[in-house]
Amino acid sequence: MQTVYANLRTWARRTTTSFADLWAHSDAPPPDTQPLARGELIYRLKNWPDLPPAGKTADVYRVLSVMSNRAVNRTWILATCRLAPHEVDALLRWLVRQGAVEVIDVSHFANAAL
């Protein structure tokens, strides 16, 4: 007789699709492991921003939640949420204007490593 854990694991493998499963079958690495484009900035949330009513969506909250734990770049945001490129740019501008994010230019780290 199988345990409850084994039954749930078997069921989950048959009935769900995750991004990890999709990446396992594609040639591209997941967005978290992709190298930064030359000159691309990364953003880390310093404090929770005051969002306009139009910005209070699940996708925006998801991005802000991740940004509160680690720095992310624009490419990661586009790859992991359903925001359009112009919406991502508007969100990042809003966050920078409010001083809610730390903007990190990683290009000088590459020069230091040489």
Image (cartoon, rainbow, N blue to C red):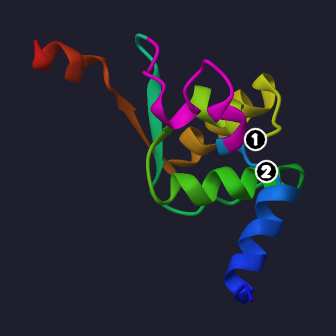
Residue tagged 1: 81
Which residue is found at the position 68% from the left and 28% from the top? 25
The reply to whether residue 56 is in sight is no
Classify mark 1: residues with Cα within 10 Å, few (<14), some (14-19) or many (20+).
some
Magenta part of the chain:
21-37
Residue tagged 2: 59
Quarter of the view holding residue 6: bottom right
The reply to whether residue 68 is in sight is yes
**Is 81 one of the magenta-colored residues?**
no
**66 with respect to 18 (left or right):** left
Along the line of sight, the residue nearer the viewer: 33 or 103: 33
Which residue is found at the position 17% from the left and 13% from the top? 111
Image quarter (top left, top right, bottom left or bottom right) of the N terminus: bottom right
Residue 44 locus on image (x, y percent): 45, 47
Q: Secondary structure at mark 1?
A: loop
Q: Tell me the amino acid under the disc marked 2.
A: Asp
Residue furthest front in the image: 1
Quarter of the view holding residue 62: bottom right
- Tags 2 and 1 touching, CB below 8 Å: yes
Along the line of sight, the residue nearer the viewer: 93 or 64: 64
**52 with respect to 97 (left or right):** right
